[in-house]
Amino acid sequence: MPKQVDHRERREAIARALWRVVEQRGVAQLSLREVAREAGMSHGQLQHYFASREAMLTFAMDFATEQTTLRVDRRLAELGDRPHPRDVLRVMLTELLPLHADARATSRMSAAFVLEALHDENIRARARDGIAQGRAAVEQLLRRAVADGYVHPDRDPVVETHLLLALTGFTTLLELQVIEPRDTLTAIDQHLDRLFVEDAEDDHGAG
Amino acid sequence: MPKQVDHRERREAIARALWRVVEQRGVAQLSLREVAREAGMSHGQLQHYFASREAMLTFAMDFATEQTTLRVDRRLAELGDRPHPRDVLRVMLTELLPLHADARATSRMSAAFVLEALHDENIRARARDGIAQGRAAVEQLLRRAVADGYVHPDRDPVVETHLLLALTGFTTLLELQVIEPRDTLTAIDQHLDRLFVEDAEDDHGAG
């Protein structure tokens, strides 16, 4: 195996160890030493791959974003060539929520990163950039959906983007088992149903 | 001052010190020792008021809930004798968001508590109870609003309750300054506008 690939794979294995620490024991336990233990290597070996806690954390977050994007892309591919924008938004939103094991791991990683961001300028800048990219993607999709007659023309794409992003608040409700996964999907579906014009494919521009 | 009152006041002062640790330095710094330092007392003195980290944390969370309820009640009193249910919901929701300094302190306390809840059974049970009480209050208000013709009769109070609770997801967007407070209020107002029938006071039951 080429050295470069091996290096990348080891970093990904460390990132997954970090996710496990965050998921199982919480962000308070998140130190280089604890992640090294979980990854089954020495503190010194881990430092060969990451020079600092921040470098490790940032890589682990980028890797979580990559894995989330892969899951979204896989589910979008199942929707066929010209997916309905409602279905695209549903996939994007639900893959951010801890509705299954893989999504729970990346969701907790993301929550830990946000928490670090509150007290670290560099991490805050990166966390903001990540969310800003997601926001831009949702807003672009909604603008096009309005133009194509899928979304009621009186809806403001910026406001609707903000509401959809805010619905990631289901994360806490799911984590604490206050709301069941099924009820979460029902609520998201109702929100999307009201955003989109019925049968727009047959009747573009209908209000 | 009676001893009992003094004891309660000292506990509240410690709770506020705990909030400051969480707000300024993050939940990772949240130890009895760190809170004692912030409260300007020794570790031993603090233990006179709280026997354990969990007892201290639970009291600080209960106190945050109390303070949030007081803020909500004060704002509701300003709405007069028979407030519109839309205005009541708006106050309840926005006082949970970090839109001003007091609300940011209690919001960060609440986020820290949720985080602890993920890895502590007792705290999880308490966190769930707290949210469940809030959910029950919102659902009851919505059921009455549907019955009184304020809310569209085709709306399901349970689903609408879930969506309103999920909108606490604005917390992260505000904390990371991805969305401005003004844009948050605009989005919440649009969500509420669509939930409530226009001019229901003059025209009960209008669809």
Image (spheres, coloured by chain):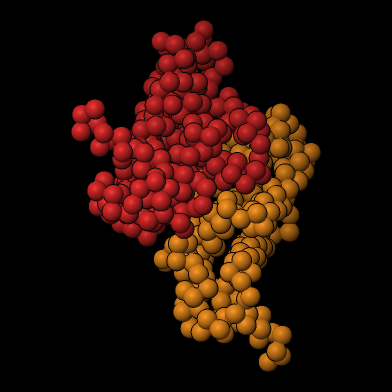
Chain colours: A red, B orange
Q: On screen, A168 above or below A206?
A: below
The count of marks equals: 0
Q: Where does residue B194 sit, x and y in percent of width and height?
A: 60, 35
- Given residues B123 and B206, the one toward you in this image is B123
- Which quadrant of the structure image shows residue B1? bottom right
Q: Where does residue B65 sit, x and y in percent of width and height?
A: 63, 62
Q: Residue at x 45, y 62 (%)?
A: B28
Q: Residue furthest bottom?
A: B1
Q: Where does residue B200 sit, x and y in percent of width and height?
A: 70, 39
- Which quadrant of the structure image shows residue B120? bottom right
Q: Quadrant of the C terminus of chain B?
A: top right
User: Does the rendering let one see residue B170?
Assistant: no
Q: Residue furthest top?
A: A202
Q: Residue at x 65, y 43 (%)?
A: A177
Q: Residue at x 59, y 80 (%)?
A: B47
Q: Residue at x 36, y 43 (%)?
A: A14
Q: Where does residue A57 sit, x and y in percent of width and height?
A: 34, 48
User: Does the rendering let one see residue B43?
Assistant: yes
- Given residues A205 and B128, the one toward you in this image is B128
